[in-house]
Amino acid sequence: MKTSMKLILGLLFITFPLQSFAQKPEPVYSIVRQIHDFDWYQQQARAWKQEIDNGTTNKMAWVYWFRANRMATFSNKEKWDNNQGNYFMPQDKLLKLAEKAIPNTFELYFLEAYINGSYTPVGSENIMKAQAINPFATLILPDLLNHYEFENDKANIELTCKKWFESNEMPQEILITAYNNLISLDPNAILIVYGDNDTYPSWILQNVQKIRPDVMVLNISLALIDPYRERLFKEYGIPQLSFQNNSDRTTQTIVKHLIENVHNKSIYISVYASQDIYKDYVDKMYLTGMSFKYSEKPFDNLAVLQNNFENKFMLDFLKLNFYYNYAQSVVNQMNSGYLVVFLKLYEHYLLCGETVKAQNVKELAITVSKNAGNNDWLKYFEK
């Protein structure tokens, strides 16, 4: 167990091959859909700024320029800082330029909502303005769903999830991984998730496919926002949490509060979550699927993990796909979350003398590792 817990940290730092320099402006997506290196984002920031300077009528140029800036900071903040100037600039400065150039447009309202946060009064107002111009456009779906979550507007939460599902914007592989996670949890469990790709697909499946609506899917970052957390805790009968001071306002405090105060629901933490949020409880977290289950007492989690893997998980998509997926680099990263599962089962099957099952798991692990460009995992399957 401890070996796997240490290895899970590697999932958060996957190396991707360098992308070739772009020669022309290309759509720039969030890193939750495509991953490029810093040089690619720099090239695109320069290219889209040039398009804007040349008087393009394509208002999405402003969105792509903004994204190239923002994604470059994720890729290499130090390099972005050192290259600020004509095409790299702080988002508030870029927003002021957009307000003058494309006022009262869908694209501007999206930028206003995204930068300010859909849970703020300014963000909420602007996401509604964008929605009025282009209802349920894929560009605004995450912020729109956040808005309705904060408003506790269940009818529009369900409708937005339905529109998102019907748009086919969400890669099916990410939806399947969310399914594998949800389907393996205890009844009425709490599932703590961390980012876009283990939060939104879970909400979509719950609201559209009615898959495990009994599970409380708690995004740990959103839970830092007082009104949202307070409403959600009240709805699920969880004792309220009041932070003592700003230094105490952390995701670790929320996890600690749940573990200490919730005794009638199983608590799970997604394998995609940073280990930092549960570092004080590592020895009490047990891998049972695509999540770790908190338990005060040891239990046979390998039996649970094996049952979920052999009888509940959908895994064919890890072997081969038959369509072009613009988000493949992110899908490959998400698929790496299965490696810790494969390692635990591989060791278990070898110990039990089930060599055929061990070989099958090993082959899946090799495919996933190579697709992710993360061959360091392969050494753990050399027995």
Image: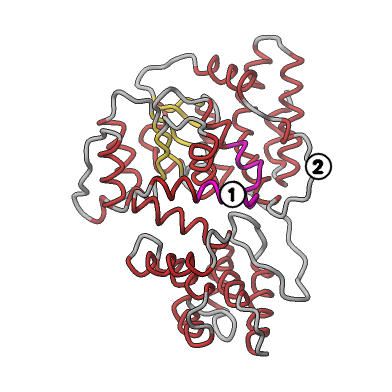
Q: Is residue 324 left or right of residue 249?
A: right
Work out which residue is located at the far bottom of the displayed protein and give it.
Answer: 54
**Sooner in the amino-acid sequence: mark 1 or mark 2:** 1
Q: In this view, does 50 lie above or below 317?
A: below
Q: Find the magenta span and give its range.
A: 160-177
Q: In this view, does 257 lie to the left or right of 59?
A: left
Question: Residue 311 falls in which quadrant of the image?
Answer: top right
Q: In this view, does 294 lie above or below 269?
A: above
- Say which mark, if any, is on residue 13: 1
- Expressed as whole percent of the image width and height from the top left, the position of residue 292 reads 47, 30
- Expressed as whole percent of the image width and height from the top left, the position of residue 327 reads 68, 53
Of 79 and 332, the residue lying toward us: 332
Of 324 and 282, the residue lying toward us: 324
Q: Which amino acid does label 2 sit on?
A: Phe
List the residue tagged with mark 2. 322
Asked if residue 206 is among those painted magenta in the image, a careful observer would answer: no
Find the distance from the CA under tag 1 to the CA under tag 2.
27 Å
- Expressed as whole percent of the image width and height from the top left, the position of residue 264 reads 30, 23
